[in-house]
Every structure is written in structure tokens, then in C-alpha cells.
Image (cartoon, helix red, strand yellow):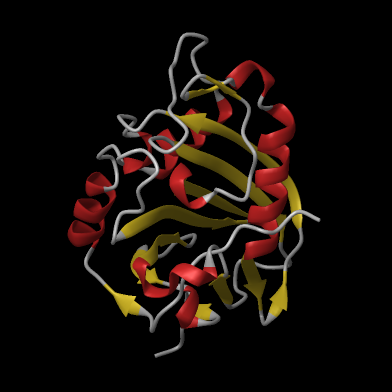
Amino acid sequence: MTRPLAILTSPTVRFPASLIACLVLSAGAPAVAHEFKLESLMNSFVKVEPGRADLVIRLPLHITRTIKLPVRGAVIDVANAGPALQQALAGLGHDVTLYEDGRPLSVESAVGRFSLPSDRSFESYETAVEHVARPPEPDADIFVDQGYLDAHLTYAIRSTASRFSLQTRVAQELKDYLKLAVRYLPPGEEGRAMVITTQSGVVALNPEW
């Protein structure tokens, strides 16, 4: 039985967008093969618009070791990685949950790809979405522990006026060593950014202060 991906959680912390940008850029540094970095970062956007919500998320490959990736030597065999990618997307849809007014939403569609550690597409929502929709270059050598799993999940919602929240359970055994940076993009409002872990539980994205 496939073990779902896991993520860590700690008390919710709100950070300025400039700090989030620094964290995101630092996540682009290559990881040493077979070595877990003491501080790892997942990067994501949650965008709400009429009828739908989008979660675009990037995970370092070194935290997805429960997924058996086909390899050619030390690099991912991208041409034959379709089944492993679908397994990873299913696990991600299970381990990261978006809620509307306390109701967990079901994933309507999910697409994903593997990316090089040098990629900077997740600096903005628009470039992240565009990047995930494109397949990797045929000659891209993505090392198993040195790249990213990028995914775009969509959900049907009732109203943009609902209260939305998010929970991550990815790699729970890593606890606060694994952080999820979230940039929430509601319609007609200023966006906000926060960093959570699996210890945070269900975190309000648009809280009533």
C-alpha cells in the first residue's frame, strides 16, 4: 500500500512578502544527494476566483522518498516517470488539504512535473502555473535528490466570500524541519503570506482578526 507523502507543521507565523521571497529563493539551492537539509522549504500559492480555487505547490524531491522514481543512473527517467508522478500527485492531494468554511475540498484536477533545482518559476503565481503546465525539457538531467516536484491542483468552491483554510501533513516525521510557505491570493484583496508546518494544524488563510 502506497504511503502518502508527509509534511511538517508548527504554529502559524506571518511574514512580510519580502521575507517569503528570500525563503523561496533560498529553496533553489541544490541539495546534496541522499542528504536531508536541516531546514527544507515547500513553496506554494493559493488563488481563489469565482467557482474555483488553485493550489500551486513545489516540493523538494528529497522529501518524496516514498515515491519510487524510475532512474537512469543518478537522474530521473522523465520519459517513463508518468506512473510515479501520478502516484505523487495522489499522495499530495491527500496530504495537503484545502478547506472552504471548514469543509475539506476534493481535488478536481491535478497536473505536475519534475523540475531542475535551478528553476525560478515559483517567484510568482503566473510563472509557476505556466511552468507546471509545460513538460520538462527532453535533455533535462534532474537528479533524484536535487530537483523539485511541482504540482497544480484545482478545486471547485461555492463562493469567493467563504473562509478558506489549509492543512499540510506532508512528511509529518520531519516536523518543524519542513516548512510550507503559502502566498494566499484572494480576489479583490491584498494577498498575504505565511509559513506553516505539519504542527500548525488547520490554518486560516483569510482569518477574521
Vertical placement of 81 versus 17: above or below? above
Instruction: Judge by depth and name the residue closer to the eye, 9 or 172.
Output: 172
Is any atom of residue 109 visible in this view?
A: yes
Vertical placement of 176 versus 67: above or below? below
Q: Which residue lies most toward the right here?
A: 1
Instruction: Judge by depth and name the residue closer to the eye, 131 or 41.
Output: 41
Image location (x, y in percent) of residue 153? 64, 48
Identify the image quadrant of the N terminus.
bottom right
In the picture, residue 82 is in which quadrant? top right
Q: Is residue 22 left or right of residue 100?
A: left
Residue found 51% across the figure and 70% down from its top: 173
Residue found 61% across the figure and 66% down from its top: 160
Q: Which residue lies most toward the bottom here?
A: 209
Image location (x, y in percent) of residue 70? 63, 27
Identify the image quadrant of the C terminus.
bottom left
Image location (x, y in percent) of residue 140? 44, 15
Q: Is residue 111 left or right of residue 11?
A: right
Q: Is residue 169 left or right of residue 102?
A: left
In the picture, residue 143 is in which quadrant? top left
Residue found 72% across the figure and 39% down from its top: 86
Is any atom of residue 51 visible in this view?
A: no
Residue found 65% across the figure and 45% down from its top: 88
Image location (x, y in percent) of residue 133? 57, 28
